[in-house]
Amino acid sequence: MSYIHQSIDYLKQTSPCQSEFYQAVEEVLESLTPVLDSNDRYQKQAIIQRMIEPERQIIFRVPWVDDKGDIQVNKGYRIEFNSALGPYKGGLRFHPSVNASIIKFLGFEQIFKNALTGLPIGGGKGGANFDPKGRSDGEIMRFCQSFMTELYRHIGPTTDVPAGDIGVGAREIGYMFGQYKRLTGRYEGVLTGKSLLWGGSLARKEATGYGAVYFAQYILEDRNDTLKGKSCLVSGAGNVAIYAIEKLYQLGAVPVSCSDSRGTIFHETGIDLKLLKDLKEVCRTSLENYINTHPSAQYIPVSDYPKDGHAVWRFKANAAFPCATQNELTEKDAQALISNGCMLVCEGANMPSTQAAVDAFIAANIAFGPGKAANAGGVATSQLEMAQNASMQNWTFKKVDEKLKVIMKNIFDAANDTAKEYGQSGNLVVGANIAGFKRVAEAMIEQGIV
Ligand SMILES: NC(=O)C1=CN([C@@H]2O[C@H](COP(=O)(O)OP(=O)(O)OC[C@H]3O[C@@H](n4cnc5c(N)ncnc54)[C@H](O)[C@@H]3O)[C@@H](O)[C@H]2O)C=CC1
Ligand SMILES: O=C(O)CCC(=O)C(=O)O
C-alpha cells in the first residue's frame, strides 16, 4: 500500500466518521504524489502523519439562556491545526451543521491556503453548532459571550487569531471582542473582521469576494481573456457572494444569480446588488423577497432543486462562482455547466465542488480556481488587519486593496508555476496543493520534531 493510502487509512481509523475531513485530506494527498515520490525527506520526517493530526483540538460546552428564559447548550470547537508558519489563523463558523469533521476539513484547508498567501500565519478553524437564524440580537450576544468565555483562554494576538465565516460577521465579532476584553482586560488584535470603529481594516469585508474575482481575472489573463461581458452564476448571498458580485460588476461582468439556504434567484439582466445588500446585510431576510421588487426574476425554492444537485448550476452562463458552502456543486452540476458552455469556475467558498465535480472540470480543461487559492484574499486581508493593529495604524482602502491584488497575483503565479514545474500545466488544484504543502513542510522540518 502506498504511503498516501496508509496515511488515509490511519486517518479513518483514528478519526472515525469524518467524511468532509477525509475528502479534504484525500484531495491534497492525491496531488502530492509527485512531490512525495521525488523526495523521501518528507516521508522520513513523517510530515504527512504530522500534518493530518491537529496540534490541538479544543471542544467545549456553550450554555446560554434564550429569550424565553430556557437554557440552551451548544458545542463549541477550536481546532489549532498547524503553527509552522505563524499563529493559528482562521474563521469561526456558527451553523447547525457544524461538527468535528467540518471544522477539521476547514482547518486542514486553512493550513495550505494561509501558506499560499506568503504571510506568517498558521492554520486553524472553529465554530459551534449554533443556528443564528431567527435568533434575536440579545440571544446572539449571549451566545457569543458564552462562546468566548471558554475560547478566550486559548487565543491571543500572537498565538491564535479567529475571524468570521458562515454565520459570523462584524456583529458577532463585536460581541466576542467585548467579552474577550471584559475577561482579560486587554485591548488587542485577537480577532479580525472587526468594526472599522475599533480596530477593523478597510476592505476586509470585501476581501474574500473581491479576491476570488481577482483570481478569476488572473486565470483568464493567462488564457488571453477577460471577465468583461461574461455572464456569471454566483451561489450564496452572504459576505463572499455579495462582494464577488460587486467586483464582477466593477470588472464589466454580469452576475445573474445568488442563493441562500431556502432558494435561488436567477435574474438574467443582472442581480440588483443594492437590493441584495438590503435584504441580507440590513433586513437579514430570505431571498424570496427579491421577486417582490423584481417580478421578472426567477425564484427556485429548495424543494424544486434537482435531486442530484443545485438549481443554480443548471442555468446557462460563461462562468460560475460557488460562494455558499461545501459540496454545493455536484458532478451532475459540473456536467450541466460544462455542456452549457461555462469556461471558468472559481471557488469563493471552501470545498464547494465535490471531488467528482473537480475531476470533471479538470478533464474538460475548464479554467478552475480551487478555493484554497481563490478565496485566500479574506484571510490574507485579516493578516493585514493584524499588521495594522500591531503597528497601531489604519491603512486606506486603496492601500489594502492594492496589497490584496498583489497577494492574489502571487498566489496565482505560485499555483500556476508549480503546476507547470510538475508537468500538469493549467491544473491549479495540483499547483496550489504542492506550493502550499512545500512551504509548510519545509518550515516543519526546520523546526524539528514537534
Ligand atoms: N467570510 C470569509 O472571509 C471567508 C469565507 N469563506 C467561505 O465562503 C463561504 C461563504 O461564507 P460567508 O459568505 O462568509 O458566509 P455567510 O454566512 O455570510 O453566507 C453564507 C451563505 O451561504 C448560504 N448557506 C450556508 N450554508 C448553506 C447550506 N447548507 N445550504 C445552502 N446555502 C447555505 C447562506 O444562506 C448564505 O447566503 C463558506 O464556505 C466560507 O467557509 C472562505 C474564505 C473566507
Ligand atoms: O480571516 C480569517 O482569518 C479567516 C478566513 C477563513 O475562515 C477562511 O479563509 O476560510
Image: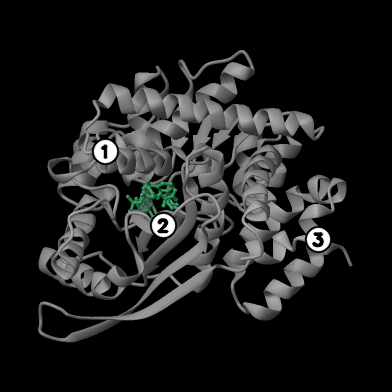
In the image, residue 363 sits, relative to residue 17, either above or below, namely above
- Which quadrant holds the N terminus? bottom right
> How many angstroms separate mark 2 from mark 1 (CA)?
47 Å
Query: Residue 23 at x, y = what percent?
Result: 64, 61
Q: As drawn, is 49 to the left or to the right of 260?
A: right
Element carrying mark 3: helix
* Residue sitting nearer the eye, 70 or 265: 70
**The image quarter in which residue 204 lies:** top left
> How many angstroms separate mark 3 from mark 2 (CA)?
49 Å
Query: Residue 344 at x, y = what percent?
Result: 58, 30
Element carrying mark 2: helix
Which sits earlier in the primary sequence, circle 3 or circle 2?
3
Residue at 53% in and 70% down: 101
Asked whether mark 2 and ligand 1 are closer than 8 Å, the reply comes as yes
Query: Residue 445 at x, y = what percent?
Result: 68, 54
Mark 1 lies on residue: 391
The numbered dot on residue 44 is 3
Mark 2 lies on residue: 302
Kindly identify the amino acid type of the residue bearing the numbered disc 3.
Lys
- Which quadrant holds the C terminus? bottom right
* Residue sitting nearer the eye, 4 or 215: 4
In the image, residue 303 sits, relative to residue 16, either above or below, namely above
Residue at 86% in and 50% down: 37
Q: As drawn, is 125 to the left or to the right of 333?
A: left
**The image quarter in which residue 298 lies:** top left
